[in-house]
Amino acid sequence: MMIASKPIHLRGGPSCSMMSQIKMVYFMLACAVSQLKLSRNANMEKLRNGYLFPEIGMRQQEHLEKYPDAKIISLGIGDTTEPIPNIITSAMAEYSHALSTREGYRGYGAEQGNKTLRKTIAATMYGDMGIEDTEVFISDGAQCDISRVQLLLGSDVTIAVQDPTFPAYVDSGIIMGQTGDYVAGSSKYGGIEYMKCGPENLFFPDFSRIPRTDVIFFCSPNNPTGHAASREQLVQLVETAHRNGSLIVYDSAYAAYISDDSPRSIYEIPGAKEVAIEISSFSKSAGFTGVRLGWTVVPHELSYSDGFPVHKDFDRIICTCFNGASSIAQIGGLACLSVEGRKAMSKVIDVYKQNARTLAETFGSMGLEAYGGSNSPYVWVRFPGRRSWDVFTEILEKTHVITVPGCGFGPGGEGFIRVSSFNSEECVREACHRLTRLLGRDVLLHIL
Ligand SMILES: Cc1ncc(COP(=O)(O)O)c(C=O)c1O
């Protein structure tokens, strides 16, 4: 409990102000010892180990304290590093300046987002997929909408996730109360279907062996494995959802990284509009991790078992729990989707894609299995017989390079690390050099 650090000076005889100061001291002392008569949310108690990325940040800090001169290279957290193209920032700057004028001032916008941006997303991202502007809800990023979709779903649903997967689906599910307790031996939470996705099954679950759940969270290209699901795989996913009456929550935050003919949206698959919500983001395509902008598509065709439209409920959630994305960010989003903006974004994405190829080749040249990297900014590297945190620690200790331990993405990630291509070309080359020089031989010794 914090108590004001400034001393309280009592001068002269008793006065009103002196009495109030004494009362204040008593109040602060009482505050120092009392607690709320409020019990902790039992769902919060279920969460283990804090959130993955703050944990890595803490380890990085400890490493810096141990080696203050170390030149740490972060290939860990998936945060973009390249500057946002000028065509995008100048549109935001112009709009911001106009806010200081009587004519240009704007207050609240529509909760669902700027109409022109909704139309432009429907047209440019979903072309001939039949997505209408009214089905597109503009958000302040995919992570926030994952939680808003969870609010929509409530606590009384069963969920399935890819294993490994981006942790937000599981963690928000726990907070909502959709899961049981953590089962230490299995590193899983009760009540969640973990769909193992590894090299053995081409990173796609065998749905014939997975019990039905109300909701299937599916991320493609996947964070952390970097695998982009093929058209055939997504057809299976949509067919499974139809057969089971399950809702797919499809996260396409990395769609802009797809280089081959893998679908960029779940709505490329016939029948998806009746079973899927898609969550997406400008974070990794436009460097908007700090600006904050994304969108969620909730098709009009989606309805609950009683026929009530899901769209109506999501609209209600957005109006109640969100008041619309920043108008400045939305202008930035529009600039991103202009012809020039798209060209500029794809140049930036190419930098990260080249980095990813360099990383994949480096690990490959050490004789390690390296996946992803061609349709995604992430490379997923297997270290046979070793534990992820041990590999993370060894790499950090010997090369001052930050990675992410695969087990942080679910039990299926044990034995892997995720390496991110979000850094400058120069830093990635330097990291590869260190990894090859300092780690290559050791790794080979471990696996031979
Ligand atoms: C798969 C996936 N979904 C969503 C997010 C969150 O994105 P945003 O910055 O739009 O909140 C991330 C961020 O790393 C991610 O990897």
Image (cartoon, rainbow, N blue to C red):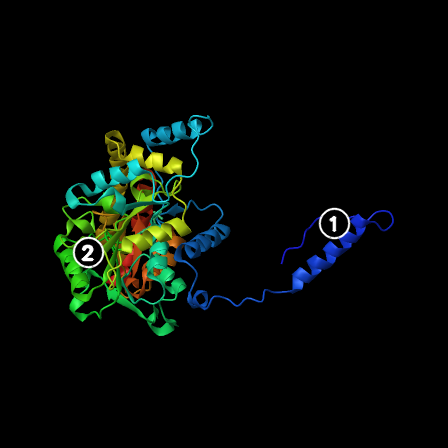
Q: Give residue 289's quadrant in the image.
A: top left
Residue 422 shows up from this direction: no
Q: Residues within 10 Å of mark 2 (few under 14, many from 20)?
A: many
Q: Is label 2 within 8 A of ligand 1 (CB to nearest ligand atom)?
A: no
Q: Quadrant of the N terminus?
A: bottom right
Q: Is residue 171 above or below residue 98?
A: below
Q: Which residue is mark 2?
A: 274
Q: Residue at x 42, y 68 (%)?
A: 46
At label 2, the amino acid type is Glu
Secondary element at tag 2: helix
Cβ atoms under marks 2 and 1 closer than 8 Å: no
In the image, 382 versus 146, the foreground residue is 146
Give residue 81's quadrant in the image.
Answer: top left
| Quadrant of image for the C terminus | bottom left
Q: Position of residue 34 (x, y in %)?
A: 64, 65
Q: Residue at x 16, y 69 (%)?
A: 208
Instruction: List x then y, in percent, for residue 29.
Output: 70, 60
Nearer to us in this view, 385 or 261: 261
Picture coordinates of residue 118 (x, y %)?
28, 40
User: Which residue is under mark 1?
Assistant: 7
- Crowding at mark 1 (Cα within 10 Å: few <14, some 14-19, many 20+): few
From the viewer's side, name the closer residue of 154 and 369: 154
Q: Secondary structure at mark 1?
A: loop
Q: Is residue 199 above or below residue 77?
A: below
Cα gap from disc 2 to disc 1, whole angstroms: 65 Å
Amino acid at the residue labelled 1: Pro
